[in-house]
Image: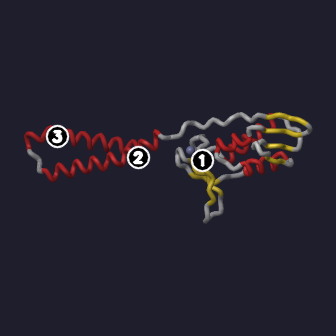
Amino acid sequence: MELQEIREAAATEFASVSKTKKLKNRTQEPNRKRQERDDRYTALLDRIFPELEKKHNVSKKISIPAPKITREAKKTFVSNFGQICQTVGRPMEHVQSHIAAELICETSIDANHCLILRSMFKPQQIENVLKSYLLTYARCTECGRYNTTMKKDENTRLTMLECKDCLSCKAIIKK
Ligand SMILES: [Zn+2]
């Protein structure tokens, strides 16, 4: 049931409960019937609240830190690489392999989770390749947020992107 429908149903139900209460003094409705109505109302509330919570608990928009890029001795460093991966909840190795494949470059990750590329790249190139990773593997195509997880569909063997905010679930298509 859509949230809007639940709201309307609740409003109708609530109106009927209020009316019952008003009428009570005059018409002495049988207790059993009144009890049934109250139970229905309670059941409805039980259904509405998790729905509302789901809507309101929608995580704060994830803001992905801009990559801190430096270049030195024919190498390029992304010093906050670990933080970026952690923010979007992706394993560093997965992001790393995407970057390595896209830029055709040897890469490594040091103890401080800094990504080291064994070649000189312009900051723009690094930003673009990170962006392409995020668009393909982390951004929900429905709501545009990054509160997602990747999951392998055992039947189709496709890697699915599941959104925790809007609950969409779509196959990841590599561009
Ligand atoms: Zn979404």
Q: Residue 133, image x and y in percent?
A: 72, 45
Q: Is mark 1 within 8 Å of ligand 1?
A: yes
The residues bearing labels 1 and 3 have C-alpha atoms spaced at a distance of 46 Å
Residue 120 lies in quadrant: top right
The earlier-in-sequence mark between 1 and 2 is 2
Nearer to the camera, 34 or 143: 34
Query: What residue is at 61 percent from the left and 64 percent from the top?
Result: 154
Residue 151 lies in quadrant: bottom right
Q: Secondary structure at mark 2?
A: helix
**Marks 1 and 3 in Cβ contact (< 8 Å):** no
In which quadrant of this rendering is ligand 1 seen?
A: top right
The residues bearing labels 3 and 2 have C-alpha atoms spaced at a distance of 27 Å
Mark 2 Cα shell of 10 Å, populated few (<14), some (14-19), many (≥20): few
Residue that badge 1 annotates: 148
Q: Residue 59, image x and y in percent?
A: 53, 40
Q: Secondary structure at mark 1?
A: strand
Label 3 is placed on what type of residue?
Lys
> In the image, is 98 to the left or to the right of 51?
right
The residues bearing labels 1 and 2 have C-alpha atoms spaced at a distance of 20 Å
Residue 21 got which mark? 3
Label 1 is placed on what type of residue?
Thr
Nearer to the camera, 5 or 28: 28
Query: What residue is at 41 percent from the left and 46 percent from the top?
Result: 50
